[in-house]
Amino acid sequence: MAALTAAARRYDSPSFVRRVAHLTGHFVAAAVAELKASGARPGNRRLYEKLRALAEREGVPGRTPEPGRLLAELLRDFPAMAPELLLYARCGPQLAGVLTGDVDPMQLLFSDTERLAELHYTTSVAHQYLNRMARELLTGLVDAWPADRPLRILEVGAGTGSTTAWLLPRLPADRTTYAYTDVSSAFFPRARHRFAAYRYLDYRTLDLDRDPAEQGFAAASFDLVIAANVLHATTDVRRAVGHVAELLDSGGRLLAVEFHDNDLFAPCYGLLGSASGFTDTELREDTLLAREQWPEVLRSGGFTSVVQLGEEPACSVLFADRGEREQHPPTPSDAAPGHFLVAADGVEGLPDAVVARLRTLGRSVSRVDAATDSARWGAALSGTEESVGIVVMLGEQANGDAARAVDPVVRQAAVLRAMVTACQALPESREVRAPGC
Ligand SMILES: C[S@@+](CC[C@H](N)C(=O)[O-])C[C@H]1O[C@@H](n2cnc3c(N)ncnc32)[C@H](O)[C@@H]1O
């Protein structure tokens, strides 16, 4: 970590940042010369003005642009920054095309053939440094997590999964649920392939600009939200933070990674539509928020304690606590069922822990067989009160052997079918739920 910290400081060093801004100025001057005839697309006006202002600040217009020479000198002086410099080397010459709309920045950065962004996220010193820090924070959380409690994780803007890859090995596979989400489902086929070993991943689209409930994500349904380099990409950061807070249960945490230097960002990720599409201009003039803005934004969005780590001033890891949610008196449909039936197939230990926990909470509980026969479920249900909660736990049994997986899976499907059949046969007045205990 010490070596990474030293290298991250170099990324953050004023001379590196200044020289990249100067390089960008030269790339922009070359692009403007190329653009003369066609001009920037109206939708790219904001981006065009931003890049031009940067070039003017660097005093480049009117001089012969020399991006190739500057890039070579940067590589000579900052060899550890090669992944960042590769990004500028690929994006810089495409600025004119991006501005006219002939080059799609999404393709430039995220195409399956080059995977430029993924390569950068995976190999750059800054990302390794931030991801390692995020992994240590997650490890602390997992170590302190009660052994009998599921850990419900949501990753927003998961994209190429470069942060995910650092975190997954630290999670307890037997009690983790992990919603891998992004505004675009285009990332999912590769992620499914890359993370095939992690069976608990669930791939879903989620747009942080919209109300999560309308997209099928219930309030208070997660213990941890991971947001690696995404909050700034939304159109309104405060609203997005509010959506994240809404999704977290009492005491839930947000683990976020953010960069803060708009000069480093402008000629690469700053080309994406999401970087120029923000509407919260009272909060920011440019895409990335300054480091010192984040704690206030998170606090005003519903987080009670905020820890900010990372090398100043270019990047941060933010770890924030949702605090207690306001408790509403239970409505009839929120009230706990009068009785619980707990059935398990292929799961050891957890069913007993669930039964014990429910009893500690003062609930009435029966352990029943995971029967494949609906009559046996009917008998178990007939002995219960009006409102009953059924908890069924079905485990993996084949240890990766596909041939041996078939019988248990068929039996477990039969268990569920028998249970549903028995529930459907109950009178209308009976209420059956799969409760969140
Ligand atoms: C800079 S990339 C983040 C990188 C990502 N964590 C990774 O490792 O690849 C920003 C990500 O945020 C996603 N994004 C942009 N706007 C979003 C929104 N409104 N809601 C959710 N995700 C969004 C993008 O699709 C992209 O994957």
Image: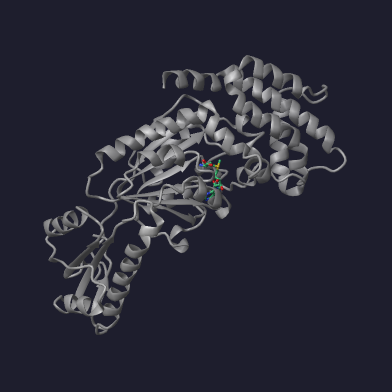
From the viewer's perspective, is 69 left or right of 182?
Answer: right
Q: Where does ligand 1 appear, by image quarter?
A: top right
Q: Position of residue 231 (x, y in %)?
A: 50, 43
| 206 in relation to 72, above or below | below
Taking the view exactly as shown, the residue that stands out farthest to the top is 77
Q: Position of residue 165 (x, y in %)?
A: 46, 39
Taking the view exactly as shown, the residue that stands out farthest to the front is 403
Quadrant location of the N terminus?
Answer: top left
Q: Residue at x 47, y 58 (%)?
A: 211
Q: Position of residue 306 (x, y in %)?
A: 36, 36
Residue nearest the viewer, comparing 2 with 233: 2
Quadrant location of the C terminus?
Answer: bottom left
* Residue 306 makes an appearance in the image: no
Q: Position of residue 361 (x, y in %)?
A: 14, 58
Residue nearest the viewer, comparing 236 with 35: 35
Rendered image coloring scheme: one colour
Residue 264 figure quarter? top right
Taking the view exactly as shown, the residue that stands out farthest to the right is 37
